[in-house]
Image (cartoon, rainbow, N blue to C red):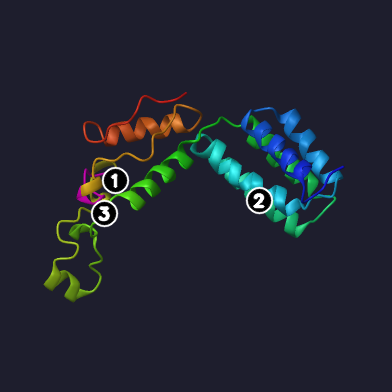
Amino acid sequence: LYDREGDVHYDTISAFIKSLRGSDPDAAVYWLARMLAAGEDPRFIARRMVVHAAEDVGMADPMALVVATAAAQAVEFVGLPEARIPMTEAAIYIATAPKSNSVVEAIGSAMGDVEAVRAEPVPRHLRDSSHSLAAARLGHGKGYKYAHNYPGHFVDQQYLPDNVRDRVYYQPSESGFEKEIRRRLLAWWKGIKRYAFPKS
């Protein structure tokens, strides 16, 4: 029996999530149907899809998060039984989208540094200079290069504190749209940032 507080609840959502991650839309729809038929809270399922759209698809297809969020909104706006249709659409979209976990790895790496490395002050050129005294007396914003004043709206400039200036938290894969993101980053930061060999 399906128990919303017991092992079957957790096992079924686990099977659903792993089917999404594993790119099997048929299995994803099946486990979704099992949960809905058992009376699982559709908001719980929708929340998991929003998370996994970002965690397992991420920048390989940023629309996955939009579709999942729209399905979550449909659950609130429409309710069951009709909400099962946009929920199914989202499940199929996530399952069939190209996959990348670079987003979750990026924030994990950055959080690791935030916890382990001494937090240095914000570099002076990045500090708020909207207040005239801050700019005039403290030099806030001095030396800042406004990206839109440069060709391609990009300028080589340090945006991290000195003690983590060489860190590369976001390592784009070559999956889906992320391949284009990787191409851009390699062009912009050539010889400056070191990007790992991509996972395809």
Inspect the image, locate mark 2, and give the three-letter code of the amino acid beneath it.
Answer: Arg
Q: Position of residue 18 (x, y in %)?
A: 65, 33
- Mark 1 lies on a secondary structure that is helix
* Residue 129 shown in magenta: no
Query: Which numbered disc, 1 or 3, marks the residue closer to the eye?
Result: 3
At a point 26% along the width and 49% down the height, the residue shown is: 160
- The amino acid type found where label 1 is placed reads His
Magenta region's main secondary structure? loop
Judge by depth and name the residue closer to the eye, 4 or 22. 4
The alpha-carbon separation of the residues under discs 3 and 2 comes to 34 Å
Kindly identify the amino acid type of the residue bearing the numbered disc 3: Arg
Q: Quadrant of residue 38?
A: top right
- Counting residues from the N terminus, which is met first, the one under dot 3 or under dot 2? 2
Checking the image for residue 47, the label placed there is 2
Q: Are marks 3 and 2 in contact (CB under 8 Å)?
A: no
- The span from disc 2 to disc 1 (Cα, nearest Å) is 36 Å
Do the residues under discs 2 and 1 have CB atoms within 8 angstroms? no
| Residue at 36%, 30% in the rendered image | 183
| Residue 25 place in picture, x, y as percent | 71, 30
Taking 181 as reference, is 119 left or right? left
Q: What residue lies at 25% left-to-right and 70% top-to-bottom?
A: 130
**CA gap, disc 1 and disc 3:** 32 Å
- Range of residues picked out in magenta: 154-162
Mark 2 or mark 1: whose residue is earlier in sequence: 2
Q: Is residue 95 above or below residue 120?
A: above
Residue carrying label 3: 118
**Which residue is more in the foreground, 78 or 109?**
109
Q: Are marks 1 and 3 in contact (CB under 8 Å)?
A: no
In the picture of the structure, the residue carrying the numbered disc 1 is: 153
Residue at left 75%, top 39%?
12
Q: Nearer the viewer, mark 2 or mark 1?
A: 2
Q: Position of residue 168 (x, y in %)?
A: 32, 39
